[in-house]
Amino acid sequence: MAKKKSSKALPPGPVMVDVAGYSLTKEEKQRLRHPLVGGVILFARNFENRRQLTKLTRQIHKARKEPLLILVDHEGGRVQRFREDGFTPLPPMRELGALWERDPLMAMRLATEAGYVLAAELRACGVDMSFTPVLDLDYGVSKVIGNRAFHRDPRVVAMLSRALIQGLQLAGMSACGKHFPGHGFVEADSHHEIPVDERPLERILEEDAAPYAWLGDAVLPSVMPAHVIYPKVDSQPAGFSRRWVQDILRKRLAYDGVVFSDDLTMEGAAVAGDILARAQAALGAGCDMVLVCNRPDLADDLLARLEFEHPPESVARIRRLMPRYAAPDWDALQAETRYQNARRLQSQIVPG
């Protein structure tokens, strides 16, 4: 009897989807095999305990011959999806910015340790990457950003984020800076509203976007644009704007990393139309991958209707985000002195 040929490996597609619970359903396995799917984002609803999470990530990685990229929003503070069964409570980034005012060197050291603990714990459970760090400036007006931001000064943001990224890299994890060119100046929450930032381009580039220019793709291999409209630059939100993604980010800032859209189901994306129009707008602007979260019906609708040939350069960029080496499992990680020291140091700045 002839051997059954193995299925052909599919390159990562341009759509990131999510899953509903603790394990994959038959429908979700089928969705993950769709050629347009390139990644999976996890949420707190996907976590019961470490053992279950590890089993789920193995299921996702095995869904395709070329494993899908698994991501999560795991920044620290109030945006930390996994908090129990051994996961370390991570500080909000504003705490590191406050420490910078007293002791810059210690702040940078602890930022590195926080990044290392964050990445090492996630990778021990099979998560490839976190959408972190937040590079938005802390103007004190944005409730959705709030203490997720490091500091008001873009130079401090760049230094602390570089240190945190170094910690991620030590554990084999890539970083994603968000929300380009900056979400901190506007009060409206793009999850529920369409924020508008009336400032001119040069002011935004001199302040909010400066960390992206200083870090570059060598340090920051991916970014996520904001669902914010900057009318003095373009009438479309940054993630739907060729002016922002192609002319400014790619050309003016010479950025060659991955560009993820923010979640296309957010209210800030509604200006583009239905889910197909939103994805077409983001991909047409130059995003390499678009996110569809919390709405499997919309994900299926998009996958059924989207006609898109993923550019080879986008596929190559996404592949560069995958970890380059295997991570130790949880028990092996706990035995590492490097990890225990990092965990003890960074825990000093978690507010009581």
Image: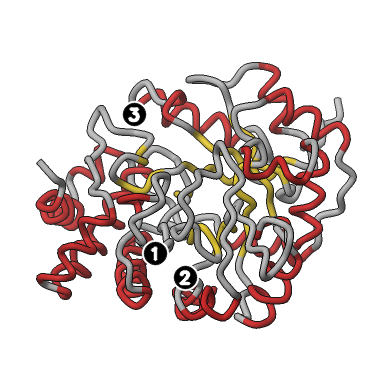
Q: Where residue 70 appears, x then y in whole percent? A: 54, 42
Q: Which residue is disc 3 drawn over?
A: 50
Q: Where residue 28 appears, x then y in whole percent? A: 66, 23
Q: Where residue 334 appears, x then y in whole percent? A: 20, 43
As drawn, the residue found furthest toward the top would be: 26
In the image: residue 14, left or right of residue 101: right
Q: Where residue 96 appears, x then y in whole percent? A: 22, 60
Q: Check the image and report above or below for 202 versus 264.
A: below
Q: Tell me the mark number nearer the camera, choosing from 2 and 3.
A: 2
Three-letter amino acid code of the residue under disc 2: Asp
Give the CA separation, mark 2 to mark 3.
Answer: 37 Å
In the image: residue 118, left or right of residue 274: left
Quadrant of res 54: top left
In the image: residue 231, left or right of residue 333: right
Q: Which residue is disc 1 drawn over?
A: 137
Quadrant of res 15: top right
